[in-house]
Image (cartoon, rainbow, N blue to C red):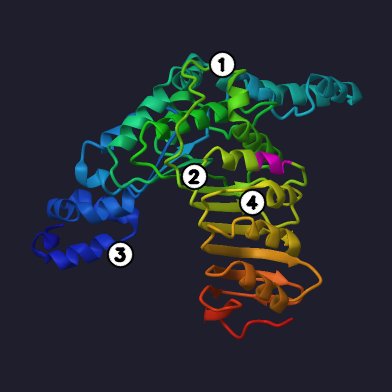
């Protein structure tokens, strides 16, 4: 790339900003001036969000970023992946009914050929789970969690990332997942629990432990799970996370620290909550109450629906310091929404509702009039919110607090405030 050696710095900055990230990585390797002059832009694009898996190489990679101040200042978010290596027992995970169900299925088969095919297919999966290298790496993942190495590396890394304010538990594969799979000879899998998701629970505890050791760095934690994760798995994982203290008492974790200091966490973002029709709203309440001084909370379900958990959530959840609330992807009764918002009327400043359905016999006008009387000074953001036959899109309403009866002022939108 001799031509780029004499190019103005503005041209190099433009290339670093607009080239596809993979192309930019290759071009930087072929031009020393581009590599040296666009390090800050490259860092903002490539290192803004860094993901790790539970392997010593991946954790060291995150820590080594802190040795370069310019790259370390580019990291804004750290994702900790729940993807793990399957152990020998995981070869049986598709038998959700257990051993008795498997034997019953075998007894119902009429031909030996079908049984032979089933056994051959099953045994073909075993070698990958029994190789010495795989067994060593699989055991190493649990050892890293049990001995506190994960929490230690995360804590040291977060302490050296001055602009990183968010850490997330996710099911996305982070840096080092491909190398870990190649070394063990087995692809990584999601933590599909067969009773208790111990791996995700230990990982969540390590994440909170690292956050508690860096009170001046991280202010936001959260979860982010893709929409294709089975609902049964979501329910088990989030229930385990909400029952963290009770579950940790029954696990053999060396670095147990139940009294974590999480008062500095002011923002919680829960993305991909399970939307199965089960009564587990209390688990969400316990999960949110883990953080006593939240100023911002975001609750997003995996798919739209009339979730039973919302009823318990709206009736029991109370955040004494909440200022900004974001909710999306569920249906709720008008009276439940009003009760939930009015419970936080002394601190709440902004509410964002996205892809929601309100159920009731009233109208938009009556609902907004009621909210404007009791929630003066509140900013209400509506995006694809349905009430009856009317759908409101991209609307921002300001309930003015200096008016005697509270006035609804439309700041921007796509039409008049609906009256029916």
Residue 293's tag is 2
Residue at 26 percent of width and 43 percent of height: 72
> Which residue is labeled 3 in the image?
18
Instruction: Look at the image and tell me whether residue 258 can be seen.
Output: yes
Q: Earlier in the sequence, mark 1 or mark 3?
A: 3
Q: Is 283 inside the magenta-drawn segment?
A: yes
> Which residue is labeled 4 in the image?
302
User: Mark 3 Cα within 10 Å, few/some/many (few <14, many 20+)?
Assistant: few
In this view, 301 is above or below 205: below
Magenta segment: 280-284
Give the prevailing secondary structure in the magenta stretch: helix
Is 103 situated left or right of 328 in this image? right
Residue at 15 percent of width and 55 percent of height: 37
Q: Quadrant of residue 373?
A: bottom right
Residue 206 position in % (x across, y down): 46, 28
Labels 2, 3: front one: 2
In this view, 135 is above or below 259: above
Labels 4, 2: front one: 2
Q: CA distance from mark 1 to mark 2?
A: 47 Å
Quadrant location of the N terminus in the rendered image:
bottom left
Q: Quadrant of residue 374?
A: bottom right
Q: Earlier in the sequence, mark 4 or mark 3?
A: 3
Quick one: SS at disc 3?
A: helix
Q: Earlier in the sequence, mark 2 or mark 3?
A: 3
In this view, 178 is above or below 133: below
Circles 1, 2 touching at the beta carbon (< 8 Å): no
Q: CA distance from mark 2 to mark 3?
A: 40 Å
Labels 4, 1: front one: 4
């Amino acid at each position: 790339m001799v031509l780029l050696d004499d190019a103005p710095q503005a041209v190099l900055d433009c290339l670093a900003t607009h080239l596809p990230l993979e192309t930019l990585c290759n071009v930087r390797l072929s031009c020393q001036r581009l590599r040296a002059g666009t390090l800050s832009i490259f860092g903002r694009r490539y290192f803004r969000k860094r993901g790790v898996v539970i392997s010593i190489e991946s954790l060291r990679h995150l820590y080594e970023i802190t040795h370069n101040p310019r790259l370390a200042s580019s990291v804004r978010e750290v994702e900790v992946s729940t993807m793990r290596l399957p152990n020998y027992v995981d070869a049986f995970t598709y038998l959700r009914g257990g051993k008795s169900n498997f034997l019953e299925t075998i007894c119902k088969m009429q031909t030996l050929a079908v049984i032979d095919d089933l056994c051959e297919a099953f045994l073909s999966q075993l070698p990958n789970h029994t190789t010495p290298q795989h067994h060593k790496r699989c055991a190493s993942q649990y050892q890293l969690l049990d001995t506190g190495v994960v929490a230690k590396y995360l804590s040291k890394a977060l302490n050296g990332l001055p602009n990183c304010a968010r850490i997330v538990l996710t099911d996305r594969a982070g840096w080092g997942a491909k190398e870990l799979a190649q070394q063990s000879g087995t692809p990584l899998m999601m933590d599909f629990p067969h009773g208790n998701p111990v791996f995700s629970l230990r990982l969540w505890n390590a994440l909170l432990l690292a956050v508690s050791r860096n009170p001046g760095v991280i202010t936001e934690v959260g979860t982010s799970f893709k929409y294709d994760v089975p609902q049964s798995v979501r329910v088990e994982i989030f229930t385990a996370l909400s029952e963290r203290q009770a579950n940790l008492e029954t696990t053999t974790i060396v670095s147990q620290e139940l009294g974590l200091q999480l008062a500095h966490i002011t923002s919680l973002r829960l993305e991909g909550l399970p939307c199965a029709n089960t009564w587990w709203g209390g688990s969400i309440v316990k999960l949110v109450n883990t953080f006593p001084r939240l100023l911002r909370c975001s609750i997003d379900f995996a798919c739209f629906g009339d979730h039973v958990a919302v009823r318990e959530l709206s009736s029991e959840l109370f955040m004494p310091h909440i200022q900004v609330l974001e909710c999306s992807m569920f249906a709720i009764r008008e009276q439940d929404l009003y009760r939930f918002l009015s419970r936080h009327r002394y601190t709440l400043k902004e509410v964002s509702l996205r892809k929601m359905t309100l159920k009731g016999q009233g109208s938009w006008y009556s609902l907004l009039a009621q909210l404007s009387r009791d929630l003066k000074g509140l900013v209400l953001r509506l995006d694809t919110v349905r009430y009856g036959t009317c759908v409101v899109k991209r609307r921002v309403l300001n309930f003015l607090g200096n008016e005697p009866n509270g006035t609804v002022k439309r700041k921007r939108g796509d039409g008049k405030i609906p009256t029916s």
